Image (cartoon, grey):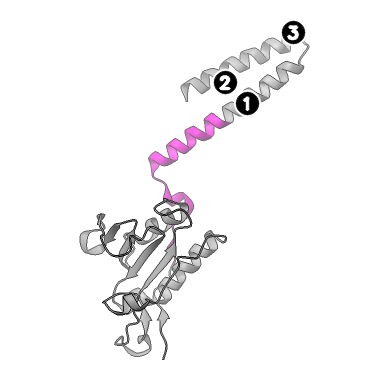
Amino acid sequence: MSWFLAPSLVALRDEVNARFPNRDKSSDGAVGDTSHAARKSSHNPLWSAPGNWSGVVRAVDIDSNGKPGERTPVVDALLNAAIGDPRAWYVIWNRQIFSVTYDWEPRPYDGASPHDHHVHISVLEAVKAWSDTSPWLKEADDMFSDKDREMLTRIDTRVANLQRVEKIRAELERETDAKRHQQLLAELSKVRADLDAS
Protein backbone atom coordinates (compact mmCIF):
# COMPACT_ATOMS: atom_id res chain seq x y z
CA MET A 1 0.00 0.00 0.00
CA SER A 2 1.27 3.48 -0.79
CA TRP A 3 0.60 6.92 0.61
CA PHE A 4 -1.97 9.31 -0.89
CA LEU A 5 -2.89 12.94 -0.32
CA ALA A 6 -6.22 13.54 1.42
CA PRO A 7 -8.88 14.17 -1.26
CA SER A 8 -9.83 17.46 0.40
CA LEU A 9 -6.27 18.72 -0.14
CA VAL A 10 -6.17 17.37 -3.70
CA ALA A 11 -9.31 19.44 -4.31
CA LEU A 12 -7.64 22.55 -2.83
CA ARG A 13 -4.52 22.11 -4.97
CA ASP A 14 -6.67 21.53 -8.08
CA GLU A 15 -8.66 24.72 -7.38
CA VAL A 16 -5.44 26.72 -6.99
CA ASN A 17 -4.10 25.27 -10.25
CA ALA A 18 -7.34 26.16 -12.04
CA ARG A 19 -7.34 29.74 -10.75
CA PHE A 20 -3.58 30.23 -11.26
CA PRO A 21 -2.76 27.95 -14.21
CA ASN A 22 0.75 29.32 -14.80
CA ARG A 23 1.87 29.42 -11.18
CA ASP A 24 5.26 28.14 -10.01
CA LYS A 25 4.95 24.68 -8.45
CA SER A 26 8.58 24.19 -7.42
CA SER A 27 7.79 24.46 -3.68
CA ASP A 28 4.65 22.30 -3.86
CA GLY A 29 4.76 19.19 -1.71
CA ALA A 30 2.70 16.55 0.05
CA VAL A 31 4.51 13.55 1.52
CA GLY A 32 7.30 14.41 3.93
CA ASP A 33 11.00 13.91 3.33
CA THR A 34 13.34 12.09 5.74
CA SER A 35 13.43 15.06 8.13
CA HIS A 36 9.62 14.93 8.38
CA ALA A 37 9.70 11.17 8.83
CA ALA A 38 11.91 11.59 11.92
CA ARG A 39 9.20 13.58 13.73
CA LYS A 40 5.43 13.83 14.02
CA SER A 41 4.12 15.60 10.94
CA SER A 42 0.91 15.76 8.93
CA HIS A 43 3.18 15.28 5.90
CA ASN A 44 3.83 11.71 7.02
CA PRO A 45 1.41 9.00 5.86
CA LEU A 46 -0.95 7.95 8.66
CA TRP A 47 -0.68 4.17 8.41
CA SER A 48 -2.94 3.72 11.45
CA ALA A 49 -5.88 5.51 9.80
CA PRO A 50 -9.04 3.41 9.59
CA GLY A 51 -9.80 1.15 6.62
CA ASN A 52 -9.03 2.54 3.17
CA TRP A 53 -7.64 5.70 4.77
CA SER A 54 -4.41 3.98 5.80
CA GLY A 55 -1.53 5.95 4.29
CA VAL A 56 -3.37 9.29 4.07
CA VAL A 57 -1.19 12.42 4.06
CA ARG A 58 -3.00 15.28 5.79
CA ALA A 59 -0.87 18.27 4.74
CA VAL A 60 0.00 20.04 1.54
CA ASP A 61 2.48 22.78 0.65
CA ILE A 62 1.52 25.11 -2.19
CA ASP A 63 4.13 27.40 -3.76
CA SER A 64 3.63 31.09 -3.02
CA ASN A 65 4.36 31.94 -6.67
CA GLY A 66 6.67 34.81 -5.75
CA LYS A 67 9.82 35.84 -3.94
CA PRO A 68 10.39 34.51 -0.40
CA GLY A 69 7.86 36.13 1.94
CA GLU A 70 6.09 38.00 -0.85
CA ARG A 71 2.32 38.27 -0.31
CA THR A 72 1.07 37.14 -3.71
CA PRO A 73 -2.47 36.53 -5.02
CA VAL A 74 -1.84 32.79 -4.52
CA VAL A 75 -0.91 33.38 -0.86
CA ASP A 76 -3.95 35.62 -0.32
CA ALA A 77 -6.29 33.08 -1.92
CA LEU A 78 -4.88 30.24 0.21
CA LEU A 79 -4.96 32.14 3.50
CA ASN A 80 -8.48 33.37 2.77
CA ALA A 81 -9.57 29.82 1.89
CA ALA A 82 -7.95 27.78 4.65
CA ILE A 83 -8.04 30.01 7.71
CA GLY A 84 -11.34 29.27 9.38
CA ASP A 85 -12.33 26.45 7.03
CA PRO A 86 -13.93 23.63 9.09
CA ARG A 87 -11.57 21.06 7.51
CA ALA A 88 -8.39 22.95 8.37
CA TRP A 89 -6.34 22.34 11.49
CA TYR A 90 -3.53 24.86 10.93
CA VAL A 91 -1.87 27.01 8.28
CA ILE A 92 1.77 28.15 8.22
CA TRP A 93 3.03 31.04 6.11
CA ASN A 94 6.11 33.25 6.41
CA ARG A 95 7.02 32.47 10.05
CA GLN A 96 3.40 32.67 11.25
CA ILE A 97 1.03 29.88 12.21
CA PHE A 98 -2.75 30.15 12.29
CA SER A 99 -4.65 27.31 13.97
CA VAL A 100 -8.13 26.34 15.02
CA THR A 101 -6.62 25.62 18.46
CA TYR A 102 -5.99 29.35 18.96
CA ASP A 103 -9.09 30.65 17.16
CA TRP A 104 -7.02 31.33 14.03
CA GLU A 105 -5.06 34.13 15.70
CA PRO A 106 -1.62 34.50 14.04
CA ARG A 107 1.26 33.37 16.22
CA PRO A 108 5.02 33.31 15.59
CA TYR A 109 6.29 30.11 14.01
CA ASP A 110 9.92 29.15 14.66
CA GLY A 111 10.13 25.76 12.97
CA ALA A 112 13.10 24.75 10.83
CA SER A 113 11.41 26.00 7.64
CA PRO A 114 10.13 29.59 7.65
CA HIS A 115 7.49 28.57 5.08
CA ASP A 116 8.21 31.71 3.08
CA HIS A 117 8.27 29.93 -0.31
CA HIS A 118 4.99 28.09 0.19
CA VAL A 119 1.83 28.01 2.29
CA HIS A 120 1.42 24.89 4.44
CA ILE A 121 -2.10 23.63 5.12
CA SER A 122 -2.86 20.74 7.48
CA VAL A 123 -6.35 19.32 7.84
CA LEU A 124 -7.87 17.94 11.03
CA GLU A 125 -7.21 14.33 12.02
CA ALA A 126 -10.69 13.19 10.96
CA VAL A 127 -12.04 11.27 7.98
CA LYS A 128 -14.61 14.02 7.39
CA ALA A 129 -11.80 16.59 6.98
CA TRP A 130 -9.91 14.28 4.62
CA SER A 131 -12.89 13.33 2.47
CA ASP A 132 -14.73 16.67 2.10
CA THR A 133 -13.94 17.93 -1.43
CA SER A 134 -16.30 20.89 -1.37
CA PRO A 135 -14.79 24.14 -2.74
CA TRP A 136 -12.12 25.88 -0.71
CA LEU A 137 -11.40 29.06 -2.64
CA LYS A 138 -13.73 31.98 -2.26
CA GLU A 139 -15.06 33.74 -5.30
CA ALA A 140 -12.87 36.72 -6.14
CA ASP A 141 -15.50 39.18 -4.86
CA ASP A 142 -15.63 37.37 -1.50
CA MET A 143 -11.93 38.06 -0.99
CA PHE A 144 -12.54 41.78 -0.43
CA SER A 145 -14.03 43.55 2.55
CA ASP A 146 -16.57 46.35 2.09
CA LYS A 147 -13.76 48.85 2.72
CA ASP A 148 -11.64 47.19 0.00
CA ARG A 149 -14.56 47.31 -2.46
CA GLU A 150 -15.15 50.98 -1.66
CA MET A 151 -11.48 51.77 -2.32
CA LEU A 152 -11.54 49.79 -5.60
CA THR A 153 -14.66 51.67 -6.70
CA ARG A 154 -12.92 54.99 -5.98
CA ILE A 155 -9.89 53.86 -7.97
CA ASP A 156 -12.08 52.74 -10.90
CA THR A 157 -13.90 56.09 -10.85
CA ARG A 158 -10.62 58.01 -10.78
CA VAL A 159 -9.21 55.98 -13.68
CA ALA A 160 -12.39 56.56 -15.69
CA ASN A 161 -12.17 60.31 -15.00
CA LEU A 162 -8.51 60.41 -16.03
CA GLN A 163 -9.43 58.63 -19.27
CA ARG A 164 -12.17 61.23 -19.85
CA VAL A 165 -9.63 64.04 -19.33
CA GLU A 166 -7.34 62.54 -21.98
CA LYS A 167 -10.23 62.10 -24.39
CA ILE A 168 -11.39 65.71 -23.89
CA ARG A 169 -7.84 67.05 -24.31
CA ALA A 170 -7.43 65.13 -27.57
CA GLU A 171 -10.75 66.46 -28.83
CA LEU A 172 -9.81 70.03 -27.79
CA GLU A 173 -6.66 69.82 -29.91
CA ARG A 174 -8.72 68.91 -32.99
CA GLU A 175 -11.77 71.14 -32.37
CA THR A 176 -12.05 74.31 -34.49
CA ASP A 177 -15.62 75.32 -33.60
CA ALA A 178 -15.48 77.94 -30.83
CA LYS A 179 -18.83 76.95 -29.28
CA ARG A 180 -17.86 73.28 -29.08
CA HIS A 181 -14.45 74.32 -27.75
CA GLN A 182 -16.18 76.12 -24.83
CA GLN A 183 -18.38 73.07 -24.15
CA LEU A 184 -15.30 70.86 -23.98
CA LEU A 185 -13.56 73.27 -21.59
CA ALA A 186 -16.63 73.24 -19.31
CA GLU A 187 -16.72 69.44 -19.42
CA LEU A 188 -13.00 69.31 -18.66
CA SER A 189 -13.52 71.62 -15.67
CA LYS A 190 -16.29 69.34 -14.34
CA VAL A 191 -14.16 66.20 -14.73
CA ARG A 192 -11.25 67.89 -12.94
CA ALA A 193 -13.60 68.79 -10.09
CA ASP A 194 -14.72 65.13 -9.94
CA LEU A 195 -11.06 64.07 -9.83
CA ASP A 196 -10.35 66.48 -6.99
CA ALA A 197 -13.32 65.05 -5.08
CA SER A 198 -12.26 61.42 -5.57
Marks 1,3: beta carbons within 8 A: no
Q: Residue furthest left?
A: 102
- Residue depicted at 41% across the width and 54% down the height: 68
Residue ID for mark 2: 191
Q: Which residues are magenta?
A: 135-159
Q: Amino acid at mark 1?
A: Arg
Of the pair 124 and 138, the residue shown nearer to us: 124
Q: Amino acid at mark 3?
A: Ala
Q: Give the mark, 1 or 3, whose residue is nearer the N terminus.
A: 1
- Residue depicted at 49% across the width and 63% down the height: 16
Q: Quadrant of residue 123?
A: bottom left
Residue ID for mark 3: 178
Q: Quadrant of residue 1?
A: bottom left
**Is 29 in the magenta?**
no
Q: Which mark is on residue 174? A: none
Residue ID for mark 1: 164
